Image (spheres, rainbow, N blue to C red):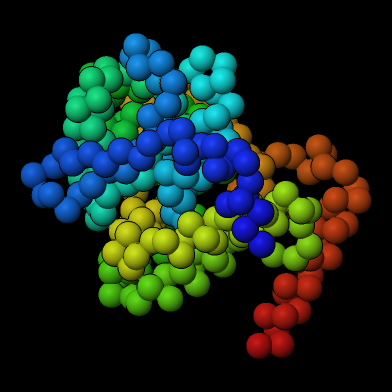
Amino acid sequence: MEEIKVSPDYNWFRSTVPLKRVIVDDDDSKVWSLYDAGPKNIRCPIIFLPPVSGTAEVFFQQVLALTGWGYRVISLQYPIYWDLIEFCDGFRKLLDHLQLDKVHLFGASLGGFLAQKFAEYTHKSPRVHSLVLCNSFSDTSIFNHTWTANSFWLMPAFMLKKIVLGNFAKGPVDTKMADAIDFMVDRLESLNQSELASRLTLNCQNSYVEPHKIKDVTVTIIDIHLRQFHGTRYAAISSDMVSAEELEVQESHLSCNQDSEDER
């Protein structure tokens, strides 16, 4: 437990990169938290946007690695926004405050969706040089929660955390993955009810990315956990690219899950 929190890399990151808090909206309660590392003379940095369960710290390894190569990296944590347009406007103001005309955006899950929506939002006056999307999506309908999106603000924190934890990997995982999950759970515990509710609302409210508005943006897609989607229309890769052994394990796992649901 907490192997990452006590690791030398994490402690070095926390001791050398200061956490900044920035207010760019008229509402003083909307505070952006961010780590800004690397040469400040670089005017087109890479900005990391976390998933629903993430905070600015979750990308500390990427920050350390990329700054070591001379890049400027910003890892941030969102204020509470309940609307995608409101988020995009707030993020634009943040870039203006940091005097950044264009940026590279790396987004994980919800972060990737918000990155795409921001690129779409600013397509007439582009602010996004490129997108890197990790385990992300472009249409919220895949979650089948659009009808409950406006109710998350009413739910207690423990229920919201249960919803998020339901997306974490289950069953045996390797040691590094287990440590990463523990770290993400710890970060999830640091988020309050309003923060979780607002993120889930952005994640699930009825919306999709209009592809023609981001067609000129370079996009890199990274998928690292999609075994659960094998055989569905959401599969990221062809089954021909997966070994027979992996498919057998996945089919066995799906069969066990189905049996468990039937017993209920």
**Looking at the image, is 217 positioned above or below residue 137?**
above
Q: Residue at x 31, y 34 (%)?
A: 118
Q: Residue at x 79, y 70 (%)?
A: 255
**Residue 194: horizontal and vertical position, in percent?**
29, 64
Q: Is residue 206 left or right of residue 23?
A: right
**Residue 224: horizontal and vertical position, in percent?**
66, 42
Residue 74 picture quarter: top left
**Looking at the image, is 260 positioned above or below residue 253?**
below
Q: Is residue 215 left or right of residue 62?
A: left
Give the number of marks.
0
Residue 24 picture quarter: top left
**Residue 192: horizontal and vertical position, in percent?**
34, 65
**Residue 101: horizontal and vertical position, in percent?**
27, 17
**Looking at the image, is 99 positioned above or below residue 191?**
above
Image quadrant where one finds the N terminus? bottom right
Image quadrant where one finds the C terminus? bottom right
Q: Residue at x 41, y 16 (%)?
A: 39
Residue furthest to the top in view is: 41
Q: Nearer the viewer, residue 137 or 99?
A: 99
Q: Is residue 78 left or right of residue 11?
A: left
Residue furthest to the right in view is: 245
Q: Residue at x 26, y 54 (%)?
A: 80
Residue 45 picture quarter: top left
